[in-house]
Image: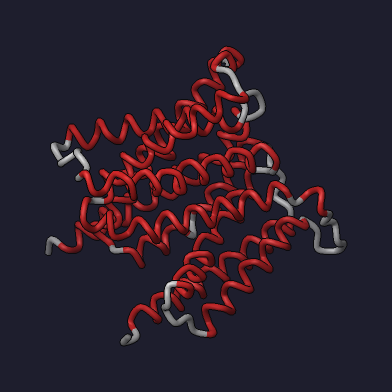
Amino acid sequence: MSAKPSRFTGDAVMVATTMLLGSSYPFAKDVLAVMSPLLYSASRYLVAGLFLLAVVALMRRPIALPRRDWVPIVVLSLVGVGLFQACWGLAMARTPPSVGSIVMTTTTAFSAILAWFGGRRLPVLGWTGIAIAFAGVVVVVNNSLSAWTLSPGGLDGVGLWLLAAFAWALYVERGAPYNLRLGALPVMAWTTLIGSLLLMPIALLFDSLGEFGRLDDRLLGYWLYTAIFPVGVAFLGLTVGLDRLGVSRVMVYMYLIPIAGVGLSAAFFGDPLTPARVLGGLVVLLGVILTRLALDRAARLPV
């Protein structure tokens, strides 16, 4: 009898988590109109890292890292926060939020490619899903169903989104053994904090803390919201989902993130919901779902 309430709670937590993750895109776009991307990314992850470590301490879980794990955790921080968040912020400043929330779903495609490089056999279904996902990205970025509008000069933001998706896939793939041994929450807390501390000096080479003076009360609230909820609280939700539902079921909920991001952007922030973006987003989702199915099947095959 206890399994059903546990799973129901996990499902409810994951619905809320995907909404929080998707909400970061439109809120961040408004803040980035007056704050530089690197300073925004570093500062909000610093707040989120401190929040997560405080939660670990309040839950009385082991917080100290074994000495042998410090170097790999720092490397994970560089990839999963430093590179990922630098690209995320720079890309968000260059593209509409709906584009970012859709393109970031290609993380699943990059996960499949990394698994293939790691020696795991990827069925034809997986390669088909990858091709479909990236074809959908082209439709989203082209943003027209009747004409070819792409030009090399307008692809820098999309390239940054794809690099961000790759960095996150690499972080998840390389971080899995440490999550199993140390716990997902402490690993997320430490990598979030360390990554922000590594990114902050780079941000301050180009930007100034005086930029916070440009934020009015509304934008300061948006900045704080994107630090605490789409990162801190959402990461807590991910750990609960992983514990109660498992990786495969949690990944299904990840497909709701672009729906939340696109819907909130259109409803409350005036991001135009064009037919090309809707169709392209559906194509991307189809591709990543096929890729996820292929990964799950490959994982069940005997080695």
Q: Residue furthest bottom?
A: 302
Q: In the image, is 94 to the left or to the right of 28?
A: right
The colour scheme is secondary structure
Seen at 32% across and 59% down, the residue is 176
Snapshot quadrant of residue 143: bottom right
Compared with residue 131, is residue 169 higher up or lower down, i.e. above or below?
A: above
Q: Residue 181 at what x, y percent from top left? A: 21, 56
Residue 22 can be seen, yes or no:
yes
Seen at 44% across and 42% down, the residue is 20
Seen at 52% across and 78% down, the residue is 126
Seen at 67% across and 65% down, the residue is 136
Placement of the C terminus among the 4 image quadrants? bottom left
Residue 19 can be seen, yes or no:
no
Snapshot quadrant of residue 81: top left
Residue in front for this viewpoint, 118 or 58:
118
Residue in front for this viewpoint, 267 or 141:
141
Q: Residue 234 at what x, y percent from top left? A: 38, 43
Q: Residue 75 at what x, y percent from top left? A: 40, 47
Placement of the N terminus among the 4 image quadrants? bottom left
Q: In the image, is 297 to the left or to the right of 185?
A: right
Compared with residue 209, is residue 106 higher up or lower down, i.e. above or below?
A: below
Q: Residue 254 at what x, y percent from top left? A: 45, 57
Q: How many marks?
A: 0
